[in-house]
Amino acid sequence: MRMILRTSVWLPALGILLFAAAARPQNPDTIAPDESEARAKRILQQVIGAMGGPAYLAMTERQCDGRRALIGHSGELSGYVGFKDAWQYPDKVRTDYVAHSRNTLLGFIIGVQDLDITKGGTVITLFSGDRGWVMDRSGISEMPDVSVSQFQEAVKQNADNLLRIETKEEGVHYRWGGTDTVDLHPVDWVEIAKGDERTIRLAVDRSTHLLVRTKVVTQDEEFNQPREDVIIYSNYQFKGGVQVPMQITRERDGRRVSQVFYDDCSVNPTLPPDYFTKNGLEKRFKETGGKAKASK
């Protein structure tokens, strides 16, 4: 009778110990590289499925309208600017901003301080690969080199490009980065690296399989020190069979720098053939003189 009692005491205790061992998070550094890569790829496929599967992979263009907030150096809200932006993946973006009277905030957002918007109007930026232009009331001019470089960096960090294009290319390396809690979401970290370029880390919600945030560390050439850029995705909604984050927040070195709030989005909209070209921008200027509202 005494032996049976001892056994009945030890069995539950042993079960608790085994459960605790099983629940203990795995260390990604102790997993074999092949297993880590397979797990990372499996998680990314789950993301693609959650984003809309075939509809998401078939998305070539996306257009949204909303408001962009600019955050000051002290974290204060500096104001909002209305806009309509459109992506033609992977590297063409056009954004129509609506300026009300003189708006120095808009010039700061775009990176062009001498915009002709003293009486309001439309300002359009267009990036295509390694070229960029801006249209205001005075005409069309080249975007500064620094703005084009920032755009090219944004293309490399764009989540849609990462998930739909990068994952199909050769020479891309994957690693499972472990589990964590990010923005109150239990997540898996997945790391994507190509050659000797930067490593981009993706936090994926373990329940919905939607992307919570991306994080990339690069070298700031101006200050010769590491720089951490974070993009936070939230408020997902189905648009044309594709999950679209309707709120996007950007942080740099732990400081929030901007937020975008989309009011509506459309996937694969019917846009003019020249919409993402300089010729299309010139045509737009001739028609409106920079005074019209944002294009539809």
Image: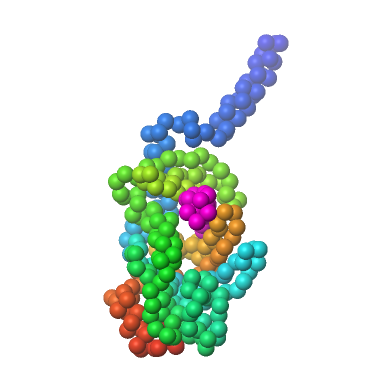
The range drawn in magenta is 214-233
What is the chief secondary structure element of the magenta stretch?
strand
Query: Residue at position x 42%, y 36% from top?
Result: 36
Q: Is residue 114 left or right of residue 181?
A: left
Quadrant of the rendered image containing residue 140: bottom left
For the residue pair 155 and 5, the one nearer the viewer reads as: 155
Check residue 163 for magenta coloring. no
Q: Is residue 179 left or right of residue 13?
A: left
Residue lying at the far right in this picture: please name it: 2
Quadrant holding the C terminus: bottom left
Query: Residue at position x 44%, y 85% from top?
Result: 137
Quadrant of the rendered image containing residue 72: bottom right
- Provide residue 116's location: percent of width, then percent of height: 48, 83
Check residue 223 for magenta coloring. yes
Quadrant of the rendered image containing residue 71: bottom right
Instruction: Indicate whether 273 appears above or below 181.
Output: below
The answer to whether one can see residue 52 in this image is: no
The answer to whether one can see residue 196 in this image is: yes
For the residue pair 280 and 137, the one nearer the viewer reads as: 137
